[in-house]
Amino acid sequence: MPSKVVKRGSKWAVVEKSSGKVKSQHDTRRKAEGSRRIRDSAREKK
């Protein structure tokens, strides 16, 4: 499932677009974007 990065309170969260489930939380948007890219690319390889 593709994911997106959203602001949740003081944290940045990586969230699945379809279900809205939070997959990870980060202190910075940059770290969250990196995590999102890794998660999305790992799914493409399967």
Image (tube, rainbow, N blue to C red):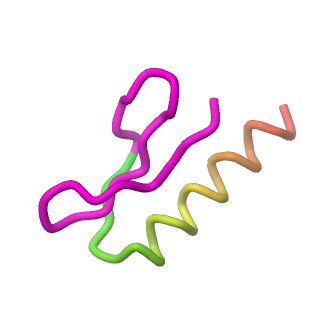
Q: In percent of the image, x 36 and y 30: which residue is there?
A: 21
Q: For residue 8, what is the image quadrant?
A: bottom left
Question: Is 34 positioned to the left or the right of 41 in the image?
Answer: left
Q: Is residue 6 above or below residue 40?
A: below
**Relative depth, front residue between 44 and 6:** 6
Q: In percent of the image, x 34 and y 77: which residue is there?
A: 28
Tell me the quarter of the image containing the N terminus.
Answer: top right
**Range drawn in magenta:** 1-23
Q: For residue 38: magenta?
A: no
**Residue that extends furthest to the right in the rendered view of this protein:** 45
Question: Is 1 positioned to the left or the right of 19 in the image?
Answer: right
Image x and y of residue 5, in percent: 44, 55
Q: Number of callouts in the render?
A: 0
Image x and y of residue 16, in percent: 48, 34
Q: In percent of the image, x 34 and y 54: which residue is there?
A: 13
Q: In this view, does 3 lie above or below 21?
A: below
Question: Is 9 positioned to the left or the right of 21 in the image?
Answer: left
Q: In percent of the image, x 42 and y 50: which residue is there?
A: 14
Image x and y of residue 38, in percent: 66, 57
Question: Is 21 positioned to the left or the right of 36 in the image?
Answer: left
Q: For residue 5: magenta?
A: yes
Image x and y of residue 3, in percent: 55, 42
Tell me the quarter of the image containing the C terminus.
Answer: top right
**Residue that extends furthest to the top in the rendered view of this protein:** 19
Q: In this view, does 36 lie above or below 23?
A: below
Characterize the magenta stretch by its predominant secondary structure.
Answer: strand
**Residue that extends furthest to the left in the rendered view of this protein:** 9
Q: For residue 45, what is the image quadrant?
A: top right
